[in-house]
Every structure is written in structure tokens, then in C-alpha cells.
Image (cartoon, grey):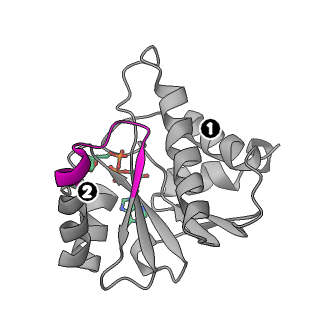
Amino acid sequence: MEIEVIKGDITKLEVDVIVNAANSSLLGGGGVDGAIHRAGGSQILDDCRAIRNKQGKCKTGEAVITRAGNLAAKKVIHTVGPVWNGGHKNEAKLLENCYSNSLLLAEKHQLKTIAFPNISTGIYGYPKKEAAKIAIETIQNFSSSIIEKVIFVCFDEENFNIYQDKDIFC
Ligand code: AR6
């Protein structure tokens, strides 16, 4: 899998699927979640509601998929990152699960290009460098015959600088 790092707004990307840093309600919120629902329109919320009605809330580390409404992407994967609690609440494993479960879901739907935001590093307060290490390591350890390209979309300068540091990619 090719890995690319860019700075920008994930809602603008023309990829097969973008990942949303959602919350367990799946009904929208602030940050990237709010931006995706605003840009994508009601189709995304309709699908999220249908998933809620069928299977209830989305647990931390798990992922679900919806249509993408008005977005240029074909689909949206919604995953729920862990809230940072000092690091003793299994946060690292849960964050790893967000990335790996999103990749598994993309594979299942034959999606070849996937873009991730820096999950949990905004409102949920995960330390950015630690989160970046987990994100990169999880992607690098995942081998796929379907997914061709993974894009890390950094929105804030701090995350972008962290992902520019070549030492973080082993
Ligand atoms: N494109 C790409 N990245 C973005 C964008 C964007 N348009 N907007 C923000 N980011 P956050 P979390 C970055 O807070 O920490 C929501 O209310 C941002 O700079 O969106 O996982 C949900 O409903 C940061 O690096 O998500 C949950 O309640 C990253 O996205 C809660 O926030 C994640 O920041 C989830 O918190």
C-alpha cells in the first residue's frame, strides 16, 4: 500500500472512501465529524440513523460504512476513537482498532483508496505524536491485496509537522 501525507480538508478528497472520526451516537458532532456531515448532506445522517436503529451505538474502536451524499468520495467509514484518559484505559489498542477495522471494512467493500483524519487528536485529546505512531504502524503492518493507497489528511499544522518527520515512518 502506498502511503501519502497531505495537509488539508478531508471533505474535499476524491478517493474511494474517507474515514470520519465519529462518536458512538453516529449522529454527528463537531470537528471533522461536523465538517463531513455538513459537506455530505442528509444522506450520510440517514444511513447513520439506519445503522443505529439496526445495531445500536457504535463502540469505541469499531467502524461502520455509509454512502457519501454530496462528497466527492464514494463512501464514508465512521469509526469511534478513544477519549484520551491518561493512557491507562486501553486507548492505544482502541485507536489501533479504529485504523485496522476501517481498513478491513474498506477491503470488504472493494475500496482501493482511503483517507484518514488524525483520529482522536482533536476533541478527544489523544497526544498527537503517540496517535501518529499508532496510525502509521497500524497501516504499515496491514497487508492488503485490495487497498492501493492510504492518505493521512492532516488538518492542523502540529499534526502535519509530526507526519512530515521521516523518523516516525519505520
Ligand atoms: N479535515 C480533516 N481533518 C480535520 C477536519 C477536516 N475538515 N476538521 C478537523 N480535523 P476531531 P476526535 C482534524 O475533534 O478528536 C466530534 O465532535 C483535527 O485537526 O474532529 O476524534 C465527534 O462527534 C484533528 O486532528 O475528532 C466526536 O464527539 C482530527 O481531525 C469527537 O469530535 C480529529 O479531531 C471526536 O473527537
**Residue shown at 69%/56% (left/top)?**
164
Label 1: how many Cα within 10 Å (few below 14, some 14–19, many 20+): some
Give coordinates of residue 91: x percent, y percent. Answer: 46, 26
Look at label 1 and name its amino acid: Ile
Give the residue type at disc 2: Ile
Camera-near label (2 vs 1) is 2
Q: Position of residue 78 (x, y in %)?
A: 38, 56
Instruction: Kindly indicate the quadrant of the structure image that contains residue 43.
Output: bottom left
Residue 71 percent location from the top left of the image: 37, 82
* Mark 2 surroundings: few (<14), some (14-19) or many (≥20) residues within 10 A: some
Query: For the residues marked 2 and 1, what is the alpha-carbon distance in whole angstroms?
Result: 28 Å
The relative height of residue 71 versus residue 81 in the rendered view (above or below) is below
Tag of residue 51: 2
Query: Residue 147 vs residue 14: left or right?
Result: right
Vertical order, 90 against 57 (above or below): above
What residue do we see at 73% from left, 70% from top?
A: 148
- The residue under label 1 is 134
Q: Is residue 13 visible?
A: yes
The magenta span reads 52-64
Q: Secondary structure at mark 2?
A: helix
User: Going by the image, does 142 lie left or right of 18?
Assistant: right
| Quadrant in which the C terminus is drawn | top right
Residue, x 54% and y 68% (percent of image)? 109
Above or below residue 166? Residue 151 is: below
Residue appearing at x 26%, y 71% in the figure: 44
Do the residues under discs 2 and 1 have CB atoms within 8 angstroms? no
Tell me if residue 152 can be seen: no
Q: Any magenta on residue 60?
A: yes
Q: Secondary structure at mark 1?
A: helix
